[in-house]
Amino acid sequence: MRAVDPARADRLARVLRGLCRDVRCGEPLRRHTTFRIGGPADVLVVPRTADELRAVMTWLYASAEPFVVLGRGSNVLVSDRGVRGVVVKVGGGLDRVRWNGPRVVAEAGSGLPRLSFRAARRGLSGLEFAAGIPGSVGGGVVMNAGAHGHSLQEVVRAVRVVAPWGEATWPAQALEFGYRTSRLQRTSAVVVEVELELSPAPVEEVLERTRRWLQQRGATQPVRLPSSGCIFRNPPGDAAGRLVELSGAKGMREGGVEVSPLHGNYVVNTGGGRAEDVLRLVERVRERVRRTFGVELELEVQLVGEF
Ligand SMILES: Cc1cc2nc3c(=O)[nH]c(=O)nc-3n(C[C@H](O)[C@H](O)[C@H](O)COP(=O)(O)OP(=O)(O)OC[C@H]3O[C@@H](n4cnc5c(N)ncnc54)[C@H](O)[C@@H]3O)c2cc1C
């Protein structure tokens, strides 16, 4: 493990504090991931306004300092060694929403569950599927998050990004959405806000669907234990959870993590879990599924930091 250079981190933090109020050195990233796993960031920057985010990103692009972007940390596995350089967290704080009839513009850090319920209460349909997805709308667009046969690509109209070449609005057609993927995964652009177009519908109907889907999730997924949601992508025409279950891997453990006995595609942190436990467990599960079905499971969760 390369030691953190505290003097270098301090220098970086001093510059960044001129651009953003919330800058922390050596912050444990397990506090910022739903898995409750992850070592320290040399420097964590938490912009609370779009202007702070723009200023931080403009400086990072110009200085060529390495950086990683986190949203609400719900689809990542952060290394136990943490992240060298700067982590920019686009989460709570950057969550203002402008409502204009069915057109909604949400800052990138807006939480999907709250946005989904707020839309439902306004009689706006299209985000019911997102009530149980504990990510940000920015991270959701990057991942094209979805559930219950729907995904964000159906309602996203455009995103506002800051990128090394400046700020721009990209229409949905430019985002190349696919299953849990978008063009944003292949650029260093950062999402500042997302424009959605929802459909007017009776409030009770939208709320009922939102609540029903949330309940279904609570009954079939281990939503009370720390995790990163589904750990594997579904292979074409199949469900990773089904293959994991039939291979007999449910309940398998490594250190503080386990394949959920409730849902085969969830690895849960039962206490003190480490990233290296997750990776060892993932390898054992993949091996079983490969031996049983000849299928190679791919990670859905993104690895962040020094592995
Ligand atoms: C209990 C649980 C249930 C889940 N259920 C589902 C589900 O049903 N369907 C589903 O699709 N996912 C699900 N997930 C996974 C996760 O919630 C989604 O992928 C979510 O959209 C990720 O958003 P995030 O803000 O947490 O992103 P993060 O995990 O923080 O980041 C994910 C990726 O997006 C990038 N990113 C984040 N924000 C930005 C930004 N503003 N600009 C540029 N890049 C950014 C990061 O660099 C990273 O590459 C679940 C997770 C959990 C823990």
Image (cartoon, rainbow, N blue to C red):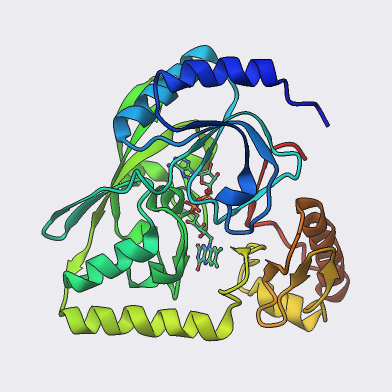
Residue 280, above or below 304: below
- How far across and down, in percent of the image, does residue 219 sit? 54, 86
Please tell me how many numbered marks the rendered image carries: 0
- State whether residue 164 appears in this view: no
Q: Work out which quarter of the rendered image holds the N terminus and state it.
A: top right
Q: Is residue 86 above or below residue 59?
A: below
Residue at 35% across / 34% down in the picture? 161
Residue 84, by quadrant, is top right
Left or right of 123? Residue 33 is right
Q: Is residue 240 above or below residue 21?
A: below
Vertical order, 48 against 30 (above or below) = above
What percent of the width, then of the height, locates residue 107? 31, 45
User: Looking at the image, which residue is at 57% across and 55% down?
Assistant: 75
Left/right of residue 153 with respect to residue 77 in the rendered view: left
Q: Quadrant of residue 231?
A: bottom right
Horizontally, residue 232 falls left or right of residue 174, namely right
Residue 149, image x, y percentages: 44, 73
Q: Nearer the viewer, residue 37 or 62?
A: 37
Residue depicted at x 37% and y 57%? 153
Q: Is residue 270 visible?
A: yes
Quadrant containing the C terminus in the rendered view: top right
